Image (cartoon, grey):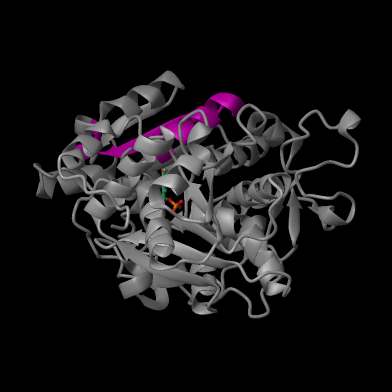
Amino acid sequence: MTSTSDPQQTSQSTVGVVDEAVDPYPTVPKAWYNIAADLAEPIPPHLHPGTGEPVTVDDLVALFPRALAEQELATEQYIEIPEPVREVYASYRRTPFLRARRLEKALGTKSRIYLKFEGASPVGSHKPNSAIAQAYYNAAEGITKLTTETGAGQWGSSLALAGAMFNIDVEVWQVKASYESKPYRRYLMELYGGKVHSSPSELTEAGRAILAQQPETTGSLGMAVSEAVEVAMKDPQARYALGSVLNHVVLHQTVIGQEAQAQLEEAGEGAPDVVVGCAGGGSNLAGLAFPFLKDVISGQATTRVIAAEPAACPSLTQGEYRYDHGDFSGMTPLLKMYTLGKDFVPDPIHAGGLRYHGMSPALSHTVKLGYVDPVAIEQQDAFNAGILLARTEGIVPAPESTHALAAAIDRINASDEEEVVVIGVSGHGQLDLPSYSAFVGNYESPVKK
Ligand SMILES: *Cc1c(COP(=O)(O)O)cnc(C)c1O
């Protein structure tokens, strides 16, 4: 792992490059931004589940390749993005940054709304930003197989894509309920060369034990994690990969915010008044917001960040800020985060990517420090905002992303201020149309009467 000095010292923007002639990917950021370097109060460390002591890089290499273990604990401000990762990023980055004029008109607002659209990635969400980096570092250390769990399939398809790029076998345990009811993402995982199992499966001790007790279970993320972790632990050539929550995942997602900053500048805007995103494990919002918070921390901007979470899984607005495990079975390090408790099972909601009991420790810390305002959004209100976006701008946002849109619209409706509002649209909803059809009949326009 190499670190860089602040690339802004050598270039106007972090997305620009010193010499375009020697950089084949001039629109792709050169480094990931690490907020740990700038926070006056450090992010609380993860604790070893056995000893209760802060985890070390050596503890983490049992789970992750060394480069990722180092990134998890890194304190450098910028970490250089390896060239092969930038090459894959260049196939879809930078992602679109759109002024939502027709949405502004519909809302009757003087505010200027910009959408940062990660739905333009090959699988339709921000998740490849970390999957590609993780596959690269695993391949570089000789790992030939990655295992993971997936709910609706966004993370599984991102890792399958990344495995295809770096010649790594990808094996995914998909929660049985989604495996059976949402086959499209499974087809996508298989198309990229991934192997997909319905979880719980007969392939693991964990799966067999669950099936012996609950033969009719429709599965859960917690069960799928146990299966994926077990397979990775038993195979020295295999590792487990996580799609959100951890510091290194958040780090990889900061390409979103760095691009948005450059794109905002190109649009002739200064620092935004508000940055809004949805928060499940926290990675897309942190990735968008942290480069903006850098300027807030240094006193150069006053941007507020809004974290929109589902009312059915309200870890930031209702959870406790304390140490908790990241998984249901208590195998992961203890993470300091806003949590509903590792045993919390939310009601099934359509925004599957937001159904997580905890929250990124880095994002939790910025909430605790007062940089980020969390809000909880009801499901119908979220879909109303998504449908309004589709009917004004044409984009069908992912059910997760509709929470960010609803929170932004609430803010705009509540004030007459002229503000610059950046909304993170973390994915598209083209594979979630059955969810939309369940809400479109009850559509109520969020436009203020
Ligand atoms: C997974 C997912 C999320 C939630 O994950 P975060 O780590 O909070 O970003 C949000 N939006 C989409 C489209 C997703 O696939």
Q: Is residue 327 above or below residue 93?
A: below
Q: Is residue 215 left or right of residue 25?
A: left
The picture places residue 397, in percent across and down from the top left corner, at 39, 40
The picture places residue 125, in percent across and down from the top left corner, at 47, 38
Nearer to the camera, 436 or 174? 436
Nearer to the camera, 414 or 281? 414
**Residue beneath the point at 57% across and 53% down:** 288
Counting every numbered tag in the picture gives: 0
Secondary structure mostly taken by the magenta-highlighted segment of the chain: helix
- Indicate the quadrant where residue 316 lies: bottom left
**Residue beneath the point at 8% across and 42% down:** 216
**Residue beneath the point at 63% across and 76% down:** 42
Q: Is residue 449 left or right of residue 307?
A: left
Residue 171 covered by magenta stretch: yes
Q: Which quarter of the figure is the C terminus placed in?
A: bottom left
Q: Is residue 49 something one can see in this rendering?
A: no
Q: Is residue 311 something one can see in this rendering?
A: yes
Q: Which residues are magenta?
A: 153-179
The picture places residue 276, in percent across and down from the top left corner, at 49, 58
Q: Is residue 351 left or right of residue 121?
A: left
Residue 346 covered by magenta stretch: no
